[in-house]
Image: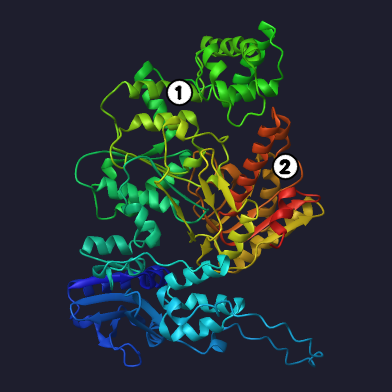
Amino acid sequence: MIFRIADTFTAALARLTADEQKAVKTAAFDLQTDPTRPGLSLHRIDAAKDPNFWSARASRDIRLVVHRTEGALLLAYVDHHDAAYAWAARRRIEAHPKTGAIQIVEIRERVEEIAPPRQHDLFQPEAPAPAPAPVRKPLFAALDPDALLTVGVPEDWIADIRAADEDGFLALAPHLPAEAAEALLEYAATGRLAAPAPVPVEAAGYAHPDARRRFVDIDSTEALEAALAAPWERWAVFLHPSQEAVVARDFAGPARVLGSAGTGKTVVALHRAARLASAPGDGRVLLATFAPALAKALAAKLDVLAGARPGIVPRTRVTTLAALAEEYYELAEGRRPRVARPEQVRDALLKAAERLGVEASERFLVSEWTHIVDAWRLPDAEAYATVPRLGRKARLGSKQRERLWPAFAEARAILARQALVTRAEVFAVATDWLAARADKPFAHVIVDEAQDCGPPELRFLAALVGEGENALFLAGDIGQRIFQQPFSWKGLGIDVRGRSATLKVCYRTSRQIRSTADRLLPDAVTDADGLADARAGTVSVFEGPAPEVALLADEAAEIEAVGAFLRGAIADGITPAEIGIFVRDEAQLPRARAALAAADVPALELTAVGEEAGARASLGVMHHAKGLEFKAVAVMACDDEVLPLAARLEAVADAVELEEVYVSERHLLYVACTRARDRLIVTGVEPGSEFLADMAARG
């Protein structure tokens, strides 16, 4: 017997209490092993329009809705008795007449029953009727029924879709199959109806890519246990077709997946790691990122994804690039590296310049060292004289470079006499040690948040693997680059042209939050190799309240406003663990602490190492927001001279670097805002950050 689970079942399961979930899981195991067991009371639901809907008893009041056909059982839904039967009465499961994908089709209601009802005040006389509102043109009037069928719209919803204006469609969208809603949202945003990729005849029904995003085959009790394990993670079981295509594809060279925040790049990286680790052979897989907190989160998610496949975790290493580089540095040098702090590097540069009589500003010396000399590990004056200066406005002639080089060489010697190395030097030593060996430690390397890789990290990654199939895979978002100046990947031998994919469906963030955050970035972000990440056409799969963007008169007013936001979130059922509060740097943390105290919300202050928040909210600087997500987010203290940070502006060496600071500060605010799923407030004290005016603008 074929046994399947629908995403509607697991979503409904997550809404039940712990005791109810336990009873449901017991009933699910019984259905898988022996559906005729008397205690299940399996019987057809008479009120259902679909004759294949049956009910199975989990407890006195909890019922599983099962779709039963010859040789197959599908767990479709679960709820309390009356709610479960009502759900079944308004659904049917069938193959779409055009695409062939199996869909859960909601039986069409009248549009006025779906649309939000008008509010009437029964106790006050009606005000004079306002002037009639202008007639809004239907969004999809230009699309004929066949075009709508092509993207998966059920037949009995076509008339309503063609008649709907923008507000009407946003009310209708949650009632449509996901592939139809996404295609129509993209059409509404871009005016283009994307044609679905051709699907082979044998991939119809439950094998269709659109069906696989909502149904999964369960072939063992272990697989069922993993699929129902709490906390249930939807991403671990169901993949969007665009994600699945990237996970399954084999690449002959370095490859990259791009996408806005919340489009599932990390999900793709995880599934790709699991796929490669479960393939025949014994090749090891590296899943790496930058921050320890992110690496810890990736390891936990890999454990969830591995489930009943025990071979995945032993073959996969999850760590940070810096930690791994330090391990290979120790193998090469026989000792752990002592990494110089930024102030130690600055002092060495200033001492060297003063000792040798080199006239240059502190800003220039630090910037030139960080982005040119140290990043590219230039060994001598000749290399410095010929290195390309991508992204540097200060065009230095050969005589200027000849005059400056002794200061950089002396600074390096000063650090060496203190037994200090820079982070770039750690990567360089590790890279050289790996490059000299034919046997590589990993067959496949997958990097999350790859937009923050610099030249030392990319060289290191290339040395970790050979040149085999699927050797190097990079997931990132150019719009979230907050640590690195742009540079050419191709110039380092990492050429992803023709092997780059972009994800366009946002699962984490509501349409309102995503569109507000997107105002911080241009419509397309281009890397140093000319490859563009076009953000237009990205769609969110759910709606939510509009974000609040507010400038307050003083800090006390801001604290009160954010406190009220937090109290409202808690009152609506959001737990402290589902709340994040972020500020630009540590100097603004006291204001965030005060807002939490005003709402009586306990919080954990995040660090780079990462710690489980438990039942507390998460509080930290924006850099620590990377990779996290919350139902509600407050971004505070977005003041003038705080965002962008005045200290960074004062430290720039040229106009190009100034522009890069502005870009990366915008990216930082974008990262913080897009950690929010449902609710977002962004505040500052007047006059406020110039970025807030962009966010508040109505495009």
Label 2 secondary element: loop
Within-10-Å neighbours for mark 1: few <14, some 14–19, many 20+: many
Quadrant for the N terminus in the image? bottom left
Type of colouring: rainbow
Within-10-Å neighbours for mark 2: few <14, some 14–19, many 20+: many
Label 2 or label 1, whichever comes before in sequence order? 1
Point out which mark residue 49 bears. none
Q: Position of residue 316 (x, y in %)?
A: 30, 42
Q: Is residue 262 left or right of residue 342?
A: left
Quadrant for the C terminus in the image? bottom right
Residue 548's image quarter?
bottom right
Q: Is residue 58 above or below residue 224?
A: below
Front position in the image: 88 or 113: 113
Q: Is residue 638 left or right of residue 4?
A: right
Asked if residue 232 shows in the view, the reply is no
Q: Amino acid at mark 1?
A: Val
Which residue is under mark 2? 642
Q: Is residue 462 left or right of residue 279?
A: right
Point out which mark residue 426 bears. 1
Q: Position of residue 542 (x, y in %)?
A: 52, 68
Asked if the residues shown at circle 2 and circle 1 are in contact, with their CB atoms under 8 angstroms apart, the answer is no
Q: Amino acid at mark 2?
A: Val
Front position in the image: 1 or 261: 261
Asked if residue 254 shows in the view, the reply is yes
For the residues labelled 2 and 1, the Cα–Cα distance comes to: 32 Å
Q: Is residue 322 above or below residue 640?
A: above
Q: Position of residue 26 (x, y in %)?
A: 27, 71
Which residue is drawn at the image coordinates 44% and 25% (left, top)?
Answer: 427
Q: Is residue 48 above or below residue 441?
A: below
Front position in the image: 481 or 547: 481
